[in-house]
Amino acid sequence: MPLLTLQDVTVRFGARAALDAVRLDVAEHEIVSVLGPSGSGKSTLLRVVAGLQAPDSGRVLLAGADQAPVPVHRRGVGLMFQDHQLFPQRDVAGNVAFGLRMHGVPRGEQAERVEELLELVGLPGAGGRSVAALSGGEQQRVALARALAPRPRLLMLDEPLGQLDRGLRERLVVELRGLFQRLGTTVLAVTHDQGEAFALADRVVVMGEGRVAQTGTPLEVWQRPASAFVARFLGFDNLAPATVGGGVADTPWGKLPLPPGVPEGERTVLVRPAGLRLAAAGAEPGAGGGLRCTVEARAFRGGRVGVRLRPTDGAPPLDAECALADAPREGDTVAVTFAPGDVLVLPGAPERAEDGRDAGAGPAPGAVEAPGDATRGRL
Amino acid sequence: MAVPAAFFAVFFAYPVVSIVGRGLKTADGWQFGAITQVLGRADILHVLWFTLWQALASTGLTLLIALPGAYVFARFSFPGKQVLRAVVTVPFVLPTVVAGTAFLALLGRGGLLDQLWGVRLDTTVWAILLAHVFFNYAVVVRTVGGLWAQLDPRQEEAARVLGAGRFGAWRKVTLPALAPAVAAGALMVFLFTFTSFGVIQILGGPGFATLEVEIYRQTAQLFQLPTAAILTLVQFVAVGAVLAVHAWTVRRRESALRLVDAATTARRPRGAGQWALLGGVLASIGLLLVLPLGVLVERSFDTPGGHGLTYYRALTAVDASGTFLVPPLEAVWNSVRYAVVAAAIALVVGGLAAAALTRRAGRLVRGFDALLMLPLGVSAVTVGFGFLISLNKSPLDLRSSWILVPLAQALVGVPFVVRTMLPVLRAVDGRLREAAAVLGASPLRVFREVDLPLVRRALLVAAGFAFAVSLGEFGATVFIARPDNPTLPVAVARLLARPGDLTYGEAMALSTVLMVVCAVALLLLERIRTDRSGEF
């Protein structure tokens, strides 16, 4: 039995559905990240599980028990708030001990556990410090220790690293994952940062507009986005409607080669930026193979260079990524070819219909999970 | 929510409704016809007109004198500013009786002006207006000045850079931001002066009666309950209207303003103009606020045989004339005891009400918010008399109980507690409470663990306000205080009502004692002032 189950949970604020029939299971000892843009209903999801927000319909089960009649303070879950919400009038130890006091843990045991937790989060001996004097990273550690102290059966994190700077964030996320694995904590975290979600979680749930858009391991989600929405959210912009048949996809960029075994028909295709091969174009149009493009802009991303290409025949622009040494200069004209392994046919009907939200065209939550499950079988 | 609602139902609505009912209901049923009949009488119309115009004039005069003060307190830093801020606030919590007495000593028969130039103002409307300014100076300085100090001066600077002149920038940027606060302050002043009782009772001549004074006269002297009931209703409607407008401006004031730390916006005055402004404000404070109190103190020592403690000594003895059954000084002990109990009741009721108002939002709650202000405006005389005639049946037979006085005083204290607590409670981040709940704290525990520590200082301030207000409450107490247990204001009023130099001097002495008790309470408060400006 999963530790946490959400059954068709819906929350409406006025006419807008913050959560729209969300289904989710979290198994014991699993770390799940909910990933989505702001306003996608992620935080509402956590508030519903904590009991801070009552669902308009649907059920929340913890270890199989319906939580509807259980008030917040008896649910036995932990929640780490986005901006930590440390109690300003208490010192570090007072904050960490709070949950223990609420659960009637004897004083001596409290002190022991507080010290143990502070050590665990890397702040040994900080119990007497004022929370106002802590840096952002330290506050985050204290908030984590406070949430862990009463040994919640489920720990929820709301944008746990959102306010920290990039370097600290990347270090902490690795630390956190190690810590949770060591303690065997069941974790449900929400974030808008894909790097954070992929680094932290065993499983990622992508949300958009109150619905679950895809569920899968970080690798599955990254390699096989389930819809144009997920692809765009992950930063893939090379999307176009296409007619798939006979091992090729007919797109505005020409006929692209496909790996074998893809479904045929009217589809949306995604070309990963790394799948674009750039070569110096011949003098005349049409000479040699490939799509002629002008280089509009370049942006350095560490050791790689992102290149913005404008096809000369008026097709939609393309993003490419290549090694620093191979990168063309701005204004160059290049011939582009496509690697079959990086051309992906997205499941479901083409994007136009999806955008229009025609009846049945939008991915139903159950249907979208299917490709993820299928991939899991293959990997 | 249930406790404050029940408190107001039993100790406010029930007495007021029953006294109004008794006035309007005869054996033949309700006498609504009497309303038009009473309101058509020339003397009543005169009272209505006087109440209205003196309140308007007092409000205008207070704004005229206090707004420069608000500016000076907000934007200038000068030595002694903290002390001066406390001094300015003293009159606000002073009992009306003391203020009346102080102005009597300044402007009345044998007063300072009378001795120096033979000028007497005590039966003119000027005495009333000046006393009202004396009282409400602090209201304007606190509501307007508090906000003014927190307005970012860089907003005005931005307007200057964009090409606005000095006055243009003030008019286009600062004034609109300030307008709701000015309106709220003006409405409070209007409310206090519209329902003025003690001041007019002491300073007003026979020709000057406000609604409240007239209600007292009709009830206690003429026993015309129907007339009093109708006047109570009129005042109720008027006050209700004012409070509705006030609630609206308060909500407007909550609109997003860029506020900064008040400490960073003040600087030393520069140039002749600014020094003159500061001097003028200090002079007006000295003349209007400090001088009356100084004269009061001086008079209390000014015995026929030179300066001495004769009057104070007389306070410790039972006097022969039979004004009191106990030495007047015992009133100090009575007052303090009553005020402590009243402050405790006000704190519990007001604190719970404020907590309830913070947790919930919506139309109903907002109505409750306004309702809490009503005791400030409903005739205290009516409340006092209502207590006497309605709380006489078991299980509420409290007429002979001492608790009656603190209960009536607490009614007046509750609005102050709510106004002080509400901004602070609203500033507590709701997610702190959620964090505590998720960690296993029950709702009651959340209040104890999260809210209480954060609002402890505000609670102390509220307690002090409730204490000072209870100490000075006069309109209701005068009805229900027993002759053998007078409070300080009641004792002062009784002394003033009897002719004779000794009783006059005793009144001055007792007023001084009352002023000192209030001032000490207030100065203690200033030390624990909260960082946030309250709504008073």
Image (spheres, coloured by chain):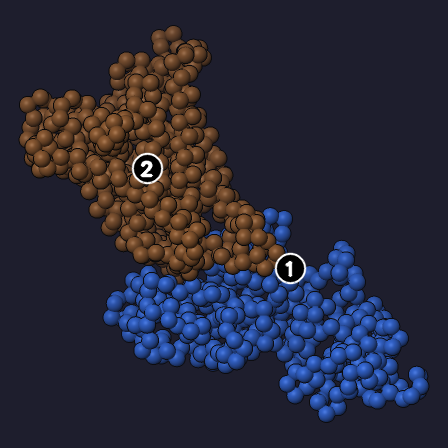
Give x and y (percent) for residue B71: 42, 49
Residue found at x 78% / y 83%: A330
In the visual, does A2 lie left or right of A138? Answer: right
Q: Nearer the viewer, mark 1 or mark 2?
A: 2
Mark number, residue B331: none
Give x and y (percent) for residue B184: 45, 40
> Which residue is identified by label 2?
B135
Query: Is residue B396 visible from the viewing direction of this image?
Result: no
> Which residue is identified by label 1?
A209
Which picture quadrant has residue A292? bottom right
Q: Quadrant of the C terminus of chain A?
A: bottom right
Chain identifier, blue in the render: A
Residue found at x 48% / y 35%: B245
Residue found at x 25% / y 49%: B523
Determine whether the residue tagged by mark 1 lies in a helix, strand or loop: loop
Q: Answer few, some or many: residues within 10 Å of disc 2's Cα (few below 14, many 20 plus, some between 14 and 19).
A: many
Quick one: which residue is furthest to the front in this view? B117
Q: Amino acid at mark 1?
A: Glu
Chain B drawn in what color? brown
Depth check: give the residue in front, A213 or B81. Answer: B81
Depth check: give the residue in front, A193 or B311. Answer: B311
**Cα gap from disc 1 to disc 2, whole angstroms:** 57 Å
Determine whether B132 is above or below A186 in the image: above
Depth check: give the residue in front, A181 or B51. Answer: B51
